[in-house]
Amino acid sequence: MLELLLNGEGETLALASALADAFAPGDLIGLEGGLGAGKTTFARGAIHALGVPATTAVTSPTFALVHQYEGRFPIAHADFYRLNEGAELEELGIDELLEEGCVLFVEWGRKFPSVASRASLWVELEIVSDEARRVRLHPQGERGEELIAGLSARL
Ligand SMILES: Nc1ncnc2c1ncn2[C@@H]1O[C@H](COP(=O)(O)OP(=O)(O)OP(=O)(O)O)[C@@H](O)[C@H]1O
Ligand SMILES: [Mg+2]
């Protein structure tokens, strides 16, 4: 586990961007933390770093559930806040997105075992003050360790 303090949105975007350098097709990144903690902000930083033009807005997929982008790889950004635990994730095509080579960001995914088991990295954000967030990076499996290896050198 790696813990950092992020002073301002810019630092969250920079961390996301540094991590994104290591992301590759099939990676599932879980974003956790309460309302307004910065999950979508983190996803925005990573998605732009993955080659989606800065002019393309990255917004919350709360209502659409999944937004898709084309960067260096296909990218999907999901938000399952509105889904209850019994929801049929198969219908959302999460496995297909990963098999198609998407990098997948999922907010509120921990409550779904099929998402949780496939995550390589959990990014857990916590509100400290108006502008400050604490982030804990929890790698899962070998791939997770790869994703955070050498991160401090990239920051
Ligand atoms: N250090 C910071 N990192 C990220 N966001 C910050 C930071 N400081 C302030 N903010 C603000 O906090 C808000 C975070 O909103 P964001 O939509 O990213 O949260 P979220 O975790 O996705 O919320 P939700 O649960 O509603 O999806 C933004 O308005 C952002 O500008
Ligand atoms: Mg969000």
Image (cartoon, rainbow, N blue to C red):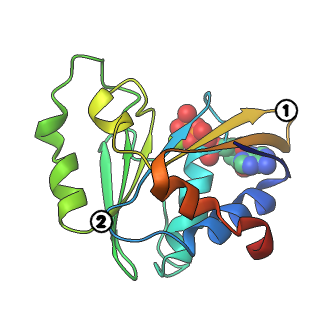
Residue drawn 22% across the image and 47% down it = 94
Q: Relative to 69, does residue 143 appear above or below in the rendering?
A: above
For label 2, count other residues whose C-alpha is less than 10 Å away and answer few (under 14), some (14-19) or many (20+). many
Quarter of the image that includes the C terminus:
bottom right
Residue drawn 13% across the image and 38% down it = 90
For label 1, count other residues whose C-alpha is less than 10 Å away and answer few (under 14), some (14-19) or many (20+). some
Residue 25 locus on image (x, y percent): 33, 69
Q: Relative to 27, does residue 73 appear above or below in the rendering?
A: below
Quarter of the image that includes the N terminus:
top right
Instruction: Provide the residue designation for mark 2.
Output: 102
Between label 2 and label 1, give the one nearer the viewer: 2
Q: Relative to 8, does residue 99 appear above or below in the rendering?
A: below
Instruction: Provide the residue designation for mark 1.
Output: 128
Residue 83 is drawn in which quadrant? top left
> In this rendering, would 66 be left or right of 87?
right
Q: Is residue 39 visible?
A: yes
Residue 26 locus on image (x, y percent): 32, 62
Which mark sits nearer the N-terminus, 2 or 1?
Answer: 2
Q: Residue furthest front?
A: 142
> In this rendering, would 95 be left or right of 37?
left
* Numbered disc 1: secondary structure: loop
* Numbered disc 2: secondary structure: loop
Do the residues under discs 2 and 1 have CB atoms within 8 angstroms?
no
Q: Relative to 50, does residue 15 appear above or below in the rendering?
A: above
Q: Nearer the viewer, residue 79 or 122?
A: 122
Q: Nearer the viewer, residue 82 or 114?
A: 114
Residue drawn 39% across the image and 46% down it = 61
> In this rendering, would 22 be left or right of 72?
right
Type of amino acid at the residue the image marks with label 1: Val
Residue 120 locus on image (x, y percent): 45, 50
